[in-house]
Each structure stands twice: as C-alpha cells, then as structure tokens.
Image (cartoon, rainbow, N blue to C red):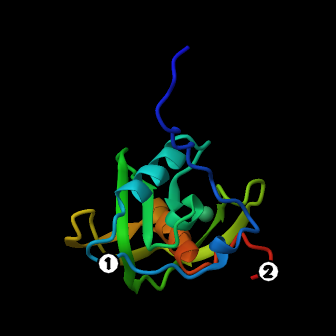
Amino acid sequence: MIKRKGRRKPNPKLIMAGDPILETVCSDVKPGDDIAHIIKDMMYLLVNSKNGVGIAAPQAGYSKRIIIIREDIGGFLTLINPTIESLSEKEIIYEEGCLSYPKIFKEISRPKSIILEWVNIQLVGKGCLFEGREARIIQHELDHLDGKCKMRMDI
Ligand SMILES: [Zn+2]
C-alpha cells in the first residue's frame, strides 16, 4: 500500500448563488498580498467551466478585486484592481449568463465600450479601451467585485 504524505488540496469549487461572498464588496489587492493561488484557482474554474468567458475572485471564494476574462484573440487576461475610467454613452442590450447563477439569462443594457485601468500580476499599471464582447464581460465581472451581479433576483 502506498501512503500519501499529507492530504492533497481539494479542487477549487465554484461559489454558487446564495453564498454571501457573492454579495460582498471585494477589497483591493495590495503589494505583498499572495494572489498566485487565487489566480490559479480562478483559472482552474474558468478553464473547466462550460462556456465560461470570465470569472471574478469571489466566484472562487476570495473577496479580492481580481478578474480573468477570455480574450477575443484566445488566451486569458488577468485584471487586478480594475477600475473604469470612462464609459461610452452608447449602450447595447445583450443576453448574459453567469457561472454562479446557472440557468438564469437576462437581457442587460451596458455601455458598448469602456476605458479600463488595472494592474497586472507584477502590479504594473495598465490601461486599455475595450469594446463589444470584452467590454461586456469585464463589466459583468466588475459587478461581482461590488457584490452586485445582475443575475441576482434581489437587485
Ligand atoms: Zn458572473
């Protein structure tokens, strides 16, 4: 019989509707915070999700301002402490779903484009204009960081 030393860390679990962490305002990532394991858990959940296009840290159980999105060009983009600097006046209505609120789909109007600022994993400041699909995913995930996913029935 092979004895395993210690216990292997269980796979991360997606936080589902009703958990108070999904209704909590997340705190900023600060220099020195150990976020590598948070990003690893988020990536695991996103990659293993069905049709997932983005994830916010509270969906992995961490109340921190981190989101990861699937980019249009393929690959993933990690956004730490993201803040919207400006929004387009033009809004677009589109149907959204959420990994934490399965089977709920809502038509939601959101600005078509956003200018976003964030820091990367090395905590270097970045900024970029996002449009269309990416802008929508980012805005959806930003709602999670404020505990206000629009899939919630009570808001
Ligand atoms: Zn969501």
Instruction: Give the residue at x 36% y 45%.
Output: 75
In the image, what residue type sits under mark 1?
Answer: Lys
On the image, numbered disc 1 is attached to which residue? 30
Label 1 element class? loop
Q: Residue at x 36, y 63 (%)?
A: 35
Ligand 1 quarter of the rendering: bottom right
Name the spot of residue 115 as percent of width and height, x first: 34, 78
**For residue 119, side relative to residue 17 (left or right):** left
Where is 89 relative to 52, above or below? below
- Vertically, is 7 above or below 57? above
Q: Nearer the viewer, mark 1 or mark 2?
A: 1
* Few, some or many residues within 10 Å of mark 2 (<14, 14–19, 20+): few
Q: Is residue 51 above or below residue 58?
A: above
Residue at image coords 53%, 39%: 7
Q: Is residue 92 above or below residue 10?
A: below
Give the quadrant of residue 103. bottom right
- In the rendered image, the quadrant that contains the C terminus is bottom right
Q: Amino acid at mark 2?
A: Asp
Residue 74 is situated, as x and y percent measured from the top left of the image, at 37, 44
Name the residue rendered at 57%, 43% in the picture: 10
Which label is found at residue 47? none
Quick one: label 1 or label 2, which is nearer the N terminus? 1
Q: Disc 2 designates what residue? A: 154
- The answer to whether the beta carbon of the residue marked 2 is less than 8 Å from any atom of ligand 1 is no
